[in-house]
Image (tube, rainbow, N blue to C red):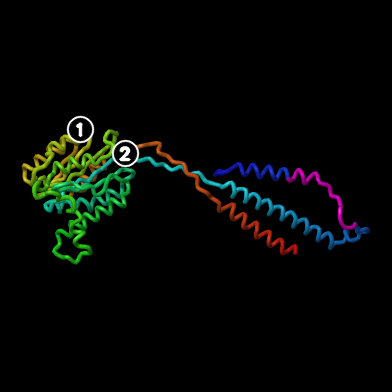
Amino acid sequence: MALRYPFFLIIISIGIIIYFIINKKKKENYTIGSKIANTNYIKNSNYYKKKVKEFNLIKKIIYIIFGCSIIACTILISRLVKIDTINNDQYNRDIFLCMDVSASVDELNLELVENLKETVKKLNGERFGISIFNTSSVVLVPLTDDYNYVISILEEIKKSIQANNSTSDDIDNFSYVRNYIYSGTLEDNETRGSSLIGDGLASCVYNFSNLEEERTRIIILSTDNDLAGNPIVTLEEAAQISKNKGIKVYGIGTKIMNSEDRETFLNAVLKTGGKFYEHSTLTVDNIVKDIESTTKSLLKNQTQTKKVDIPQIPFIILIISILGFILISKKVI
């Protein structure tokens, strides 16, 4: 514990010392009233002696109460604080979920977002982002350590996928929920086509901030790699960009991928130093475990010192002193 403004303690202490020095020099001179003669009889009586003892006791108690009040007030003015040292060590790992939201990937994406919600809850200082694509790419969550927000967006994606696979329109805000993963991802699809995987991956790469800084960067890419249009960047070119930027891609393919699409996808993610997974009952669990085991540098010495006011103790002493003074006053009166 410490005082935020210790100079108040010094000032008040000096004031008290000066008061006692001045008061000690004063002599008991009777300047008013008249002296009473022949008081020895009264002073020797038991009643008088009892009252003198009571008076001296009360005087001492009042001095003690007064002293406690002064001390409590001094501490309150000086602001008693406790010093808390908070360890803000964080892992400098960035993870981006890059999802192909074409209908053929719905089953995989549904399982992926459900499992990632539990993974996000376990993160500690790492940043997580979400990017979805079809014809064009949309960032739903830029890199952030606001895990509650990330989980809420994963839940919105889940609801949207479920709505698009449901025949019922009883869902609240059905149109909004259904179009949540389509809005912005189908721009110009009439001419460019859909499932532009290379464009989606390349766009996700440049969603990472400060690429010149040394950090562990990972992309989780879910797709069936079924290209149905004219991309600006091919998957192979996007994988090379990822490799050049030091970003590993962990790719998850659907169960219905043909052998050619699978081979292309496999080669692309391996080029980045990542891993390829085929969708199965254990795929998502495995990819989460592999990502959690990746190297992550710890940013140490991120400590923060905070001063927290703790006025409770001196305030309680002051209240007790005031109540004690009131009780003594009633006794005297």
| Rendered image quadrant of residue 248 | top left
Residue plotted at (65% across, 60% down): 323
Bounds of the magenta span?
A: 19-34
> Callout 1: 10 Å neighbours few (<14), some, many (20+)?
few
- Determine whether, in the image, residue 233 is placed left or right of residue 142: left
Q: Is residue 149 visible?
A: yes
Q: Percent position (x, y) of residue 27?
A: 83, 47
Q: Which mark is residue 92?
A: 2
Residue plotted at (31% across, 43% down): 126
Which quadrant is the C terminus positioned in? bottom right
Are dots 1 and 2 in contact, CB under 8 Å?
no
Amino acid carrying label 1: it is Asn
Amino acid carrying label 2: it is Asn
Q: Percent position (x, y) of residue 61?
A: 71, 55
Q: Percent position (x, y) of residue 66?
A: 69, 53
At numbered mark 2, what does the secondary structure look like: helix, strand or loop?
Answer: loop
Question: Between disc 1 and disc 2, whose residue precedes?
Answer: 2
| Rendered image quadrant of residue 230 | top left
The Cα–Cα distance between marks 1 and 2, rounded to whole angstroms, is 19 Å
At numbered mark 1, what does the secondary structure look like: helix, strand or loop?
Answer: helix
Q: Percent position (x, y) of residue 308?
A: 50, 47
- Determine whether, in the image, residue 68 is placed left or right of residue 110: right
Which quadrant is the N terminus positioned in? top right
Inspect the magenta stretch and tell me whether residue 22 lies in it: yes
Q: Which mark is residue 244?
A: 1
